[in-house]
Amino acid sequence: MKAIINTDASNTISKIDNRIYGSFIEQLGRAVYTGIYQPAHSEADEEGFRKDVIKAVKSLHVPLIRYPGGNFLSQYKWEDGIGPKDQRPTRLDIAWRELETNQFGLHEFMHWSKKVGAVPNMAVNLGTRGIQEAADLVEYCNFPSGTKLSDLRVKNGDPKPFAIKTWCLGNEMDGPWEIGTKTASEYAHLANETAKAMKQVDDSIELVACGSSSLDNPTFGTWEETVLDECYDNVDYLSLHRYYGYYGDDDPTELDNFLAKNEDLDQFISGVVAMCDAVQARKRSSKQINLSFDEWNVWYHSNDADTKIKPWQVGPHLLEDVYNFEDALLVGSLLMTLLKHADRVKIACLAQLVNVIAPIMTDTDGGVWLQSIYYPFMQMATYGHGVVLNSSVDVPTYNSRQFKNVPLMDSVTIYNKDANELIVFAENKSQRENADLSINPTGFDIDHIVEATQFYGYDVKADNRDGKMAIRPLTSVELTGENISAKLEPLSWNMIRMAVK
C-alpha cells in the first residue's frame, strides 16, 4: 500500500492550543483515593500524594486537568473539602453511590495540579446548586484577600489566589442520569445568570457551557441551539462529550469498523461547529464560540463488572477498563482527529487520568503501571505542539459496516517553529499491508531525522498488565533530498520528527 503526504508550510489549519492535551480527575472510584492521594502508601509525599503517580502524570505532559466532575459534580458542595481535615464531613456521593470523606478537596487538588505541572479546569455544580454558590467559589479561589471568602482561603493555607482561568458551568445537564437534570431552557437561563455573576467577580475567567451530553440523546441539536441563544454573549466555549467502544450490535472481532470510529468524531465536531456558527450568524455577532471536548476516550470494558460493585464504599473499583492494543490505536486516531479541528477545538480532556477509564493505573499496595493508551497520548502531548498543517494525503480507503471511504492510514503533520521541527504522526490501520509512506514537504528545508518511532507488534486484544509494551525505533525511515520515506507496519502507530534548517 502506498501512502503519500504532501504538506506545505503556507497551508495551515491552526496553531494548537496546548490545552487540547488536557485530562480529567473526578472523585469517582479510585481516581483520587488510592489513585493520586494515598497518605499511607510508601510513595506518599508530605501531602499524601503518590509520588509514583506524579511522575507518571508529568511524563504524560498533561497541561490542564478538569475537576471535580463529572456526575459527581452535580451533588458536590465544594465547602466540604476545605479547612482542617478532621472537621470535614463524610457524605453520601449519590451520583456514584460511594462514601466521600472529603479528605481530598479544593486545596489538595490545586497543590497536586501544581506538582504535576497542570492548570485547573474547575467545574461548578449547577445540578443541585446555583448562582451564588458558583460566584462564591470564584471569590474563594481568585479574589486576593479582604473578603470573608478570600480571607478564608488565606486562613486555610493559601495566601495567593489560585487564579483559575477556565470554568465549566455544570456537567451533562441534559443527561437523565444526572442529579439535577435540566431542560434546555432551564439550563440556558441558569448558566447565563451564573456566568454573569462569576464574571462580575472575576472578568478575566473563561466559561464553558454544557453542550448536549451525548450525540445519541434526543436533546442533541436543539439543546445546543437553545443554550447558545441565551448564553452566547457570556460564555466562551461549548462542551462536547463522546466515548467509543464495542457497543450494541458491534462484533468484538470487527476491527476495521472499530478503528474507523474517529470518522464519527470528525462528523460530530463538524456538526457542533456548524451549530455554533449558525447561532453566531443569526445573532450577527463577531464573537466565535470554540469547543471544549472535555470528555473523550474509549470506554466499554468495565460496563458489566461495575453493576456488581457494593455501594457506599470509599474508593471502590469502578470503571477500571483495562485497555488493549486496538484501544491504543483508536485513541491515536481520535487524537489526530481532534488536532485536525484545532481551529475550533481549543480544550480537550481525556477522561480520565488515573484508575478510572485511565492511561495510568495504580496498585493499592504496589506501584504504577501504564496502559496501552498511555503511549500515543504521551507522544502527542510531548511533541505535538505548534501549527497543524492542512496536508494533502493520498492513501487507499476502505468501507466498514458503519463507515465509508475510511483512509487506511490516518496522519497529522505539525510544524513546531520553536523547536525547528516538522512532526508527522501516522497510523497504519491495515491489518495485513505495510504502508510505503512518502512525505513531500514544501517550504521546509529538512536537515535530518531527529527521531522515528513505532508502537507495533502486539495482538490487538493484548493489554499492558505485564509492562512489556513500549515505543521502539522505526528504522525504515530515509531522507533523500527533501523527500522522506518510511515503511509503516500493519496496525502500527508511528511518529517521525524532522529537523528544519
Image (tube, rainbow, N blue to C red):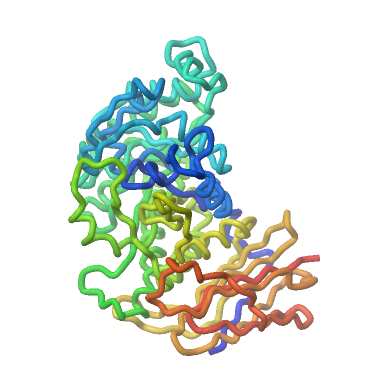
Q: Residue 78 placed where, x, y %?
A: 35, 28
Quarter-of-image position of residue 494: bottom right
Q: Is 54 placed left or right of 84 in the picture?
A: right
Identity of the residue drawn at 74% across and 80% down: 479
Indicate the quadrant containing the C terminus: top left, top right, bottom left or bottom right.
Answer: bottom right
Considering depth in this image, is 398 or 281 the residue closer to the camera? 398
Considering depth in this image, is 5 or 470 the residue closer to the camera? 470
| Circle count | 0
Q: Is 422 placed left or right of 501 in the picture?
A: left
Q: Is residue 41 above or below residue 431?
A: above
Identity of the residue drawn at 26% across and 46% down: 223
Considering depth in this image, is 360 or 313 the residue closer to the camera? 313
Q: Is residue 83 above or below residue 428?
A: above
Q: Is residue 287 above or below residue 443?
A: above
The answer to whether any part of residue 252 appears in the image is yes
Identity of the residue drawn at 23% across and 55% down: 306
Quarter-of-image position of residue 404: bottom left
Q: Residue 470 placed where, x, y %?
A: 55, 70
The answer to whether any part of residue 197 appears in the image is no
Q: Residue 284 placed where, x, y %?
A: 42, 42
Q: Residue 33 placed where, x, y %?
A: 37, 42
